[in-house]
Image: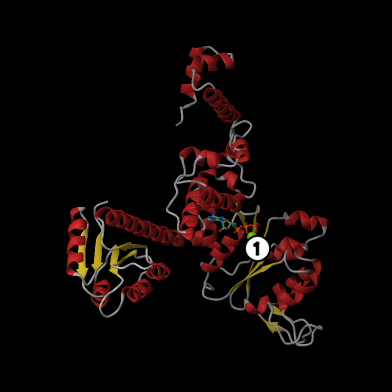
Amino acid sequence: MSDGSILVVDDEKNIRRTLALVLEGEGFTVTDAGTAEEALDLLERRRFDMLMLDVCLPGMDGIAALRLIHEQDADLPVVMISGHASVRDAVEATRAGAFDFIEKPLGRERVLVTVRNALQARSRANELQTLRAATRSQVSGLLGRSPVMERLREQIAKVAPTRARILITGESGTGKELVARAIHEQSDRASRPFVKVNCAAIPNDLIESTLFGHEKGAFTSAVGRRRGNFELADTGTLFLDEIGDMSLTAQAKVLRVLQTGEMTRVGGETPVQVDVRVLAATNKDLEQACREGTFREDLYFRLNVVPLQTPPLRTRRGDVGLLAEHFAEQVCAENGFRSKPFEAEALRRLEAFDWPGNVRELRNMVERLVILSGEQITVDDLPADLARRSRPALGVGEDVFEQGSLRDFREAAEQAFISARLAAHDWNISRTAESLDLERTNLHKKIKALGIRREG
Ligand SMILES: Nc1ncnc2c1ncn2[C@@H]1O[C@H](COP(=O)(O)OP(=O)(O)OP(=O)(O)O)[C@@H](O)[C@H]1O
Ligand SMILES: [Mg+2]
């Protein structure tokens, strides 16, 4: 890394000259300034990748300048330089967000190491910004390039601008809430409120007043009038999460609002008009709940004008790597770690796992891995049960299981079986062939036909 533009701020000319000599000798571009004021002026007009900033300066001191600089650009690494470094200076500088702190006299090696670290931090911050921007442009954080995710995104784009009620179903952790938010954000109500109600979390006797509010004195604890979620979401979107857990009484009341566009506060008499788009989500089978009598069929039909399904992660294994890397990046950024890459084999194991808790479980796992691993995330970092469970009994993917022909199934199973045996025998063909009761030449043919390759 030879490019990098550095602004050196020090009132001593000698220091500026020495630093320029050392840094330019390594291919960096150096600009200098004798005061904080001059530096701030330069920063307004030009882009720098990092700063070296003296603590003691005539006029505005270095720490004050650092604060101002970070108000403009919080990610700009600033290395503080101090002549008579006191612990207090160092602490204060760190608090003000300095990247590092070096003492005069400046040793060449120490300067170079610090500068390289700072520039690396800068380029990571840039990458992260690009990544964040890319994520934003992708339907509000719904990641995934698998065909099922593309289809879901298309469906969202189609239904979002309409007023249609949408029922989002899918297993736990598959992104139902993300989908609801994406629909809201892509609708013409985007700038209006998005109100989420977790129907499972509200006690039965409170659900009515939560949804519809209450008038003063409606019940003992109702000291004043309170607006409910339907009113709060007026002109916006109301997301009824875990709707499958709503009591039958509450269901009847919600149904009435959907039918009439009016609601009444608890203890109130005058109906209130509300203009609310309702989205609902559940991981329960509502049709079955209707048959069992725990969910009103008429409400089900009203909510389910457009059904959307979030696919379980095991049906889109191709997205696991992308999600894992995205989450790792996020966790590193949140904790101020440098990026930690995944070893290829570790990613492969994650992909092979079935993820009963879906994306949420993957996210939690990645968070744990990032925090507990060294510089890279390796197979050894994976919990033993994951490594074990990720070897599916037959090595046959869900896609083949659900849509493949008998031949696809046989090939997938054979491939997994032979690969495992080869690995177990360290790719010794004779021994593997013997263990499989096959001729060596036949094993060779199989390996070729099934496209089995040695990994690592
Ligand atoms: N496609 C995706 N891309 C990126 N992140 C995702 C995706 N799907 C889910 N997530 C993340 O996984 C976590 C769980 O998502 P969410 O809460 O939307 O799931 P859910 O289907 O509502 O789950 P539950 O039924 O348990 O409430 C969140 O942190 C969410 O940001
Ligand atoms: Mg949810």
Examine the rendered structure and indicate whether residue 332 appears above or below residue 35. above
In the foreground, 287 or 78: 78
The residue that mark 1 highlights is 305
Query: Which residue corresponds to the image point at 72% horizontal and 80% vertical from the top-left?
Result: 213
x and y, in percent, of residue 399 in the image = 58, 39
Q: Is residue 128 left or right of residue 39?
A: right
Image quarter of residue 229: bottom right
Determine the quadrant in which ligand 1 lies.
bottom right
Name the quadrant of the C terminus: top left
Residue visible at 72% across and 75% down?
A: 210
Q: Amino acid at mark 1?
A: Val
Q: Answer whether residue 275 is visible to the viewer in this image.
A: no
- Residue occupying the point 65% across, 63% down: 305
In the rendered image of this protein, does residue 90 appear above or below residue 441?
below
- Looking at the image, residue 271 lies above or below residue 127: below
Q: Identify which residue is drawn at 52% across, 57% down.
A: 142
Give the image quarter of residue 58.
Answer: bottom left
Colouring: secondary structure
Q: Is residue 9 left or right of residue 238?
A: left
Ligand 1 under 8 Å from disc 1 Cβ: no
- Relative image position of residue 278 (x, y in whole percent): 64, 69
